[in-house]
Amino acid sequence: MIENKYSVFESELSVRPDDIDMFNHVHNSRYLDYVLAARYEQMDKNYGMSWESFKEIGFGWVVTKVCINYKRALKLGDCMSIKTGILEINEKGCAVQFEIIHKKSNKVISDGTFEYAMIDLNTGKSCKVTNDMIKAYSI
């Protein structure tokens, strides 16, 4: 269960035919896509600082580390809830925890963490997260 000092937000997705692998369940790489899609939506909808707004000011978030625990399989047509929340944010970047929950059974399908660094889009190098950005994401 996600527990932290920052807000936890939720997005919903459904398994698509192109998510299925040869074992007739969702391919492990799609779990990354689900969390990234949820964060993309939540950046705009919940934090008020979209991916595009970072790009407009010359910055972007890149994933530096991922830890995923696979607990149950998702299958074609399953609906899921993706809950994410910032664990920590500072001038070096942030850590985000997540849970993917099966909507019908309410069981955790997968959980884990993503670590992100801020980069300067002009140089492609890491840079400091500003205090204004930290404040915006510290809700």
Image: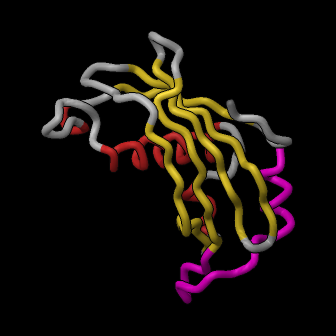
Magenta stretch bounds? 119-139
Residue at the far bottom: name it: 123
Residue at the far top: name it: 104
**Residue 122 falls within the magenta-colored stretch:** yes
Q: Is residue 38 left or right of residue 137?
A: left
Quadrant of the drawing holding the C terminus: top right
Q: Is residue 70 above or below residue 90?
A: above
Please state which of residues 94 and 119 is positioned toward the viewer in this rendering: 94
Q: Is residue 28 left or right of residue 127?
A: left
Question: Who's the residue at 68% across and 30% down the image?
Answer: 1
How many numbered discs sit on the rendered protein? 0
The quadrant holding residue 94 is: bottom right
* Picture coordinates of residue 45, whole percent (x, y): 63, 38
Scheme of colours in the image: secondary structure
* Picture coordinates of residue 32, whole percent (x, y): 42, 49
Question: Who's the residue at 80% across and 40% down the image?
Answer: 4
**Visible in this render: residue 55?**
no
The quadrant holding residue 95 is: bottom right
* Picture coordinates of residue 26, whole percent (x, y): 28, 35
Residue at the far left: name it: 22
* Picture coordinates of residue 92, whole percent (x, y): 74, 73
